[in-house]
């Protein structure tokens, strides 16, 4: 596999043109539709299933959510006293949900286990013989696609699907504790990547050199209209992040992160604007969430993430806001996470200013943290209940 590093000189020129972090972002090219209104759904998922949400995705036929529930068990070799049982549920509209049977699945992919694109949904997980991707075109029948070169019980990290196919990413070796009983605190020196052009047959794994990847931060991947971006955390004292891009899922370019610092939590694309959020706990001086945006120039930072307005609930200081995910939908950017201990949702049309959606009137405080999943017609919010009850779900109206 060829690995190309973008010339730093080119990016330096772009940075100068951007005039630092005060540069204005390019104007949105898609006018935003009216801001979504949120309606709480009663999904009918049993309260003892999907008690911990791990991921989800929208696709042409609805939505897929994946997570697990605990089953009491005697301590295993790791000292774990409960077994994790994987749960996958599908819905045509976000309101009515049914369990999906994925034969042979032992656990889900550790970071982003679900992806969807057009008429197909994908779930990443482990079998007794190695990692696999389960695919479905109707949400009912699922077929497992083994990933060659993975080890028995290995679940890998993330899956993404888009116009250029499907990509799966994992560290260069199975993850200690998560995949095996071994204790191994060494950092990783690279990644393994599998790719499918049609979502039915995977090639790989291809090895990508990425020295110093921190073992405590799982690599992730996102799909955009023109390819894929993989991101992870390194021990580099200057940036601490690594980003790689590919137009076809097989030839990867190492992107200079420019001024971006810290762990990249989530990345999305809105027209020609790329947007990501970084983890303030991995940067110096950032009290609250930092949104980074890039059009044709370099990355520009924004700390303009509102905390809400009294008398709304959970209005607190910036460091009490935790954004973990961002996605684009109908001209809007939707950021989700937690706000002072309850679910948080923020909207932006340009990635420069982020307005928190009211918590009290929407009941977001009943969830500990929220994630957003979208398809062409609906945006869906989901999160674990803050009181230990059944999964909380809202859909756009």
Image (tube, grey):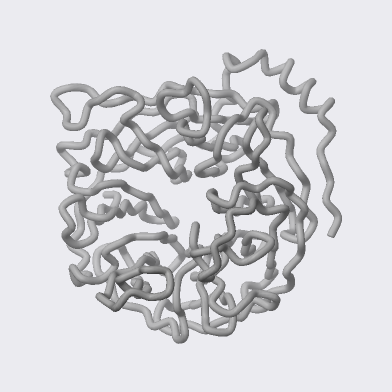
In the rendered image of this protein, does residue 357 appear above or below residue 161? above
- Left or right of 200: which side holds 284? left
Q: Nearer the viewer, residue 62 or 46?
A: 46
- Left or right of 264: which side holds 363? left
Q: Nearer the viewer, residue 289 or 284?
A: 284
What residue lies at 55% left-to-right and 53% top-to-bottom? 218
In the rendered image of this protein, does residue 355 appear above or below residue 55? above
Q: How many numbered discs?
A: 0
Quarter the N terminus occupies: bottom right
Whether residue 375 can be seen here: yes
What residue lies at 43% left-to-right and 57% top-to-bottom? 375
Residue 253 percent coordinates (x, y): 78, 47
Residue 349 percent coordinates (x, y): 45, 31
What residue lies at 46% left-to-right and 31% top-to-bottom? 280
- Left or right of 349: which side holds 366? left
In the rendered image of this protein, does residue 97 appear above or below residue 223? below
Give the image quarter of residue 309. top left
What residue lies at 46% left-to-right and 42% top-to-bottom? 326
Residue 184 percent coordinates (x, y): 58, 59
Whether residue 221 can be seen here: no
Residue 340 percent coordinates (x, y): 26, 34
């Amino acid at each position: 596999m060829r690995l190309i590093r973008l010339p730093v000189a080119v990016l330096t020129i772009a940075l100068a043109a951007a005039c630092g972090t005060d540069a204005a972002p390019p104007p949105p090219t898609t006018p935003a539709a009216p801001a979504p209104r949120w309606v709480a759904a009663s999904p009918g998922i049993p309260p003892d299933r999907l008690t911990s949400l791990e991921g989800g995705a929208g696709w042409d036929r609805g939505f897929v959510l994946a997570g697990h529930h605990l089953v009491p068990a005697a301590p295993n070799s790791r000292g774990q006293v409960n077994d994790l049982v994987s749960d996958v549920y599908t819905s045509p509209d976000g309101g009515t949900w049914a369990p999906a049977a994925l034969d042979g699945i032992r656990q889900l992919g550790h970071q982003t286990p679900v992806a969807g694109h057009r008429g197909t949904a994908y779930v990443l997980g482990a079998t007794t013989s190695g990692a696999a991707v389960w695919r479905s075109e109707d949400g009912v029948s699922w077929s497992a696609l083994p990933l060659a070169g993975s080890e028995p019980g290995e679940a890998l990290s993330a899956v993404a699907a888009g116009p250029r196919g499907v990509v799966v990413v994992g560290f260069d070796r199975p993850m200690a504790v998560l995949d095996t009983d071994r204790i191994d605190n060494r950092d990783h020196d690279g990644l393994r990547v599998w790719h499918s052009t049609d979502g039915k047959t995977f090639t790989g794994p291809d090895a990508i050199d990425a020295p110093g990847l921190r073992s405590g931060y799982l690599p992730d991947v996102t799909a955009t209209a023109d390819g894929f971006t993989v991101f992870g955390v390194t021990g580099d004292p200057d940036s601490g992040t690594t980003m790689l891009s590919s137009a076809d899922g097989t030839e990867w370019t190492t992107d200079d992160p420019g001024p971006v610092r810290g762990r990249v939590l989530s990345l999305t694309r809105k027209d020609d604007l790329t947007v990501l959020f970084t983890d303030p706990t991995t940067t110096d001086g950032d009290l609250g969430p930092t949104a980074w945006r890039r059009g044709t120039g370099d990355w520009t930072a924004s700390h303009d993430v509102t905390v809400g307005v009294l008398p709304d609930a959970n209005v607190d200081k910036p460091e009490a806001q935790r954004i973990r995910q961002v996605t684009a939908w109908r001209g809007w950017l939707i950021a989700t996470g937690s706000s002072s201990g309850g679910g948080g949702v923020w909207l932006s049309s340009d990635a420069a200013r982020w307005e928190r959606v009211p918590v009290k009137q929407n009941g977001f405080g009943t969830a500990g943290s929220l994630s957003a999943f979208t398809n062409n017609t609906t945006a869906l919010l989901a999160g674990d209940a803050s009181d230990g009850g059944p999964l909380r779900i809202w859909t756009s109206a």
